[in-house]
Image (tube, helix red, strand yellow):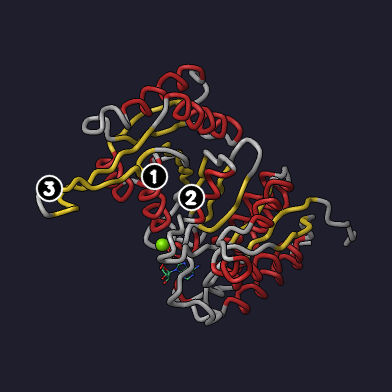
Amino acid sequence: RDKVQPHIPATLIPGDGIGPEVVEATVKVLGALGAPFAWDIQQAGMAGVAQSGDPLPPETLASIRKHGLALKGPLTTPVGGGFRSSNVRLREEFQLYANVRPALTILPGRFEDIDIVLVRENLGGFYVAHEYYIPIGDDPRAVAVSTGTNTREGSKRIARFAFDYAVRNGRKNITVVHKANILKALTGIFLEAAREVAAEYEGRVTMNDMIVDACAMQLVLNPQKFDMLLCTNLFGDILSDQIAGLVGGLGMAPGANIGSECAIFEAVHGSAPDIAGKGVANPVSLMLAACMMLDHVDLPDLAQRLRDAISATLNIDQVRTGDLKGSATTEQFTDAIVRRIIASR
Ligand code: ATP
Ligand code: MG
């Protein structure tokens, strides 16, 4: 094997809960693969609070800004102390307007042959969450109000991202998910923008639209007929967990947050405090996020070798973690993947 010097600097954030365990596992398989990342390890989440009183320390943000590329474990937002969600802060800080969440059947279970890519608008919608209460009489919180925001420009930008993604990845159809019958302004503008952008891609990518409730049902009845989903922020949050469920759960679901200058790759799952520190977490989500990162830096062959090694380990060697009804520890599973990678050289 040729020894090449790592030459793609990238920020590596271990994160909270099972984060350090799945990050270690992922770095190990990337090493076996000879992926050319030079890791700049930075803290965030609870480790960031311990280091500098901030779940997103300035050094961590500077590192991401410098490299424009990061792989991160899940971050816990401390309760109390007025901290905003670190994930939402990261998206806003680096204007990571696109969240890409693929759901691909690797280990057939309840469903087979699922291959859906969900694109979620990452900066607007109800996640803007301008919330307040209106007092009535002696009840200071008699009425709760929440507002969301979608801009025409933001909606067009995410639609363009989705259609470009479709063209680059040979995808044929995009289903735009909305609730324009009820949230006529907030999700209507999103649908309208998607239709305008779709017209520019006529003959290359088709588009249909679906109301979110109908889409949720169709995703269970006929998941194989979906190709790509384009969602507003909140609907994308919900449906991406649903499609993760179609392919084996949160342990199998990667995500990418992409902006014009930065990209941050992560697992869809959170810190899973119930199994943290036990060495039993499924690292596949973050490993698949690393595959997306390899695709992003134009190393699709390495990405495919890692996906193949994961598939062979799960299906042929039948080495699986507890969430997939197996008995392997994170380390045993990771070592099995490393053996597959070495065998594929
Ligand atoms: P957070 O508050 O950080 O979002 P959470 O309690 O919501 O954490 P998640 O990580 O979102 O937990 O996942 C919910 C549950 O799914 C976990 O408690 C865990 O049991 C399971 N789970 C999630 N990720 C994994 C994984 N990689 N391997 C095994 N089980 C997992
Ligand atoms: Mg969670």
- Say which element carries label 3: strand
Residue 166: horizontal and vertical position, in percent?
A: 54, 33
**Res 262 quadrant in image:** top right
Pointer 1 and pointer 2: residues touching (CB < 8 Å)?
yes
The quarter of the picture showing ligand 2: bottom left
Number of residues whose C-alpha sits closer than 10 Å to that of mark 3, classed few (under 14), some (14–19) or many (20 or more):
few
**Res 284 quadrant in image:** bottom right
Q: Earlier in the sequence, mark 2 or mark 3?
A: 2
Pointer 3 and pointer 1: residues touching (CB < 8 Å)?
no
> Which kind of residue does numbered mark 3 sit on?
Ile
Number of residues whose C-alpha sits closer than 10 Å to that of mark 1, classed few (under 14), some (14–19) or many (20 or more):
some
Residue for badge 2? 88
Residue for badge 3? 136
Q: Residue at 15% across / 51% down in the picture?
A: 142
- What is the C-alpha distance between the residues marked 1 and 2? 8 Å
| Front-most of residues 131 and 12 | 131
- What is the C-alpha distance between the residues marked 3 and 1? 26 Å
User: Which mark lies nearer to you, 2 or 3?
Assistant: 3
- Say which element carries label 1: strand
Outermost residue, front side:
138
Residue 2: horizontal and vertical position, in percent?
A: 90, 59
| Front-most of residues 97 and 159 | 97
Q: Earlier in the sequence, mark 1 or mark 2?
A: 2
Viewport quadrant of the N terminus: bottom right
Question: Can residue 279 be seen?
Answer: yes
Residue 137: horizontal and vertical position, in percent?
A: 9, 50
Ligand 1 within 8 Å of disc 3? The answer is no
- What is the C-alpha distance between the residues marked 2 and 3? 32 Å
Q: Residue at 21% across / 48% down in the picture?
A: 144
> Which kind of residue does numbered mark 1 sit on?
Tyr
